[in-house]
Image: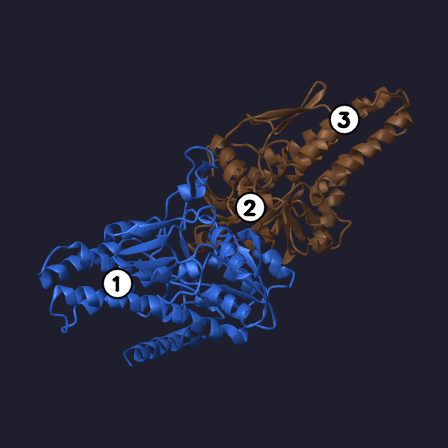
Chain colours: A blue, B brown
Amino acid sequence: MNQVSTYKSIEWKEDRLVLLDQRVLPREISYIEYKHHEDVAKAIKDMVVRGAPAIGATAAYGLVLATREKATKELSELRNYLSKAAELLQAARPTAVNLFWAIDRVIKKAHEDSIKTVEDLKKVVLNEAHQIAEEDIEMNKKIGLNALPLCSEKVTFIHHCNTGALATVDYGTALGIIRTAHEHGRDVFVYVDETRPRLQGARLTSWELKQLGIKHKVIVDGASGYFMATGKVDLVTVGADRIARNGDTANKIGTYNLAIVAKAHDVPFYVAAPTSTIDLSIANGKEIKIEERSAEEITTILGQQITPDDVNVANPAFDVTPAKYITGIITEMGIARPPYEKSLTEMVERAENERKK
Amino acid sequence: MNQVSTYKSIEWKEDRLVLLDQRVLPREISYIEYKHHEDVAKAIKDMVVRGAPAIGATAAYGLVLATREKATKELSELRNYLSKAAELLQAARPTAVNLFWAIDRVIKKAHEDSIKTVEDLKKVVLNEAHQIAEEDIEMNKKIGLNALPLCSEKVTFIHHCNTGALATVDYGTALGIIRTAHEHGRDVFVYVDETRPRLQGARLTSWELKQLGIKHKVIVDGASGYFMATGKVDLVTVGADRIARNGDTANKIGTYNLAIVAKAHDVPFYVAAPTSTIDLSIANGKEIKIEERSAEEITTILGQQITPDDVNVANPAFDVTPAKYITGIITEMGIARPPYEKSLTEMVERAENERKK
């Protein structure tokens, strides 16, 4: 894989998948090796790997492992096995559409008529997984370049969750925009939402920004309005887990509050995601299933309990930001503007045509 | 003191002040005794005790300790000593006006002509501190009753930070409203903002609500919009650290975001505070000094570091919610409505007249 960061969220090594364990960053740099797709599904569920594009690519490699687990010479038997593996991987997390998109793409390839043997199938699946990973990096770099005209010489962002190299195969989406601006000589500063409950901002985004040499300060999620009120924030950039046809966007919990607060301050609010995050099959955000995660994510931090015993908790992992709060959606194909139904549909068609070339 | 909860945030015992250590709740119920005003100032600074009304009463008792520390028969010498103690206590935290209000009130009393001896002075100061504490509880109960007409038979709140018995001498302000509704048979449910960085919601409010038998769920601060979008939230209630003449309100960081999000959902947003929190001397929120607290409040939780080493942090402890986001300000005198300059000024005058009676 063509990677550009010093750390690799996802790496295929000969016969196994290697994931950087994002649960223990930044205090521990630990890589875990996977040789079975069931373990990969669990890694996605447990958030060893997270970020919509990253879990898409991870699932694709999970399918590569599935093709190698099964000792058979029967193509149809291996295809059946692969389909079951796909079902398991799809069930790992419900909200990010990239997971389904990547699996569909691999499964479709695995059923092409040109495949005659199990060896063919193994090769095709590995090749498609590599393709997905490679494309992800290229798309992210394009997203960054497409957003560059939005960044003035001195530009201050608020960024939510983590959308960097860790959330993707490499480079990042919303954080890729920040990175591109920095690489193009802009004077960049980032207010980093810590992003409770799992603290992806405090733990992961600050860690990435530090290595990139980009100035930043970590803030609590509730402080974004305070800093916008100072007039010093130029742009809010976030990633996406699923974008509906009308532009409604599911992303990490707290994104919706941030979007409302940005609008109240006339701060442009941009979503950055590859076109694979756009789900034209759903009309709007009401159709997006929101994952409810365990209470422990809120009641304990680093294994220590912070709340009283047996406290009740509600822990939706994502929220949906209605399209009306979104200034633009930046993909590898350009910046989609309202009305999104038209611009997103056109953008996805263009992306598909380009891929077919 | 006339207290109604099973735990006491602040208690005067014969010759010493006893504070419930709110830094270690709920995992530890620990009371600390104070015999010197300098230690009381440090307790306020370190947030052993917090909440605007609670730190006001605590400072008053700090002055009681000051009158007892100094071995002198000279009234003027003791008054000088008291004034220095007042300065130290005032410097403990800059934002909550109740601290200044309570100290001013005690110091004014300490200079009354009727005081002839140091023994008189000691008595008067102790009496005034008791008075402030007693009044606080009574005012909170009135706030609760004044807000009762806003609560329907089944009522769901979002609550930020902690404004309960722990944040006051007893009973609470915004949480007192919730408590009153519950005591009057309303079917009450509370979404409890965990309130980063110090987690007063997750640690303290949930602990109080549990003991009161009030249904609740802890949520991350970024999730308030998610729950408002479900249509299930009727009211947002928060406390205040300082209210300017025009109604702009300083309160715990995250309050401003919550107010903006409430307005976007047409959810009424009420501030609850005794009239002692209203600072008519300042025209608007721009004049309120916002305390910046240590980076460690964000970078570590229960002593464990969550961020990379040497990360930069911005940690304003409060924000200012402009009056336009506030549906009403509920005090012991009633509910002030916009325009606040008129309603708050009138309310403070009425409160002062009542006190003089």
> What's the residue type where badge 1 is placed?
Ile
Measured in 3D between alpha carbons, the distance from the residue under mark 1 to the one under mark 3, in whole angstroms, is 71 Å
Q: Report the residue that reaches farthest toward the top.
A: B14
Q: Which mark is residue B64?
A: 3
Nearer to us in this view, B348 or A222: A222
At x 34% / y 48%, what residue is drawn? A46
Nearer to us in this view, A325 or A101: A101
Q: At numbered mark 3, what does the secondary structure look like: helix, strand or loop?
A: helix
Query: Dot 1, how many residues are within 10 Å of its Cα: few (below 14), some (14-19), or many (20+)?
Result: many
Quarter in which the C terminus of chain B is drawn = top right
Nearer to us in this view, B194 or A164: A164
Chain for mark 3?
B
Q: Are marks 3 and 2 on the same chain?
A: yes
Question: Are the residues tagged 1 and 3 within 8 Å (C-beta)?
Answer: no
> What's the residue type where badge 3 is placed?
Val
Q: At numbered mark 2, what does the secondary structure look like: helix, strand or loop?
A: helix
Q: Is residue B104 left or right of residue A269?
A: right
Please give the residue where the numbered disc 2 appears in the rendered image: B299
Question: Are the residues tagged 2 and 1 within 8 Å (C-beta)?
Answer: no
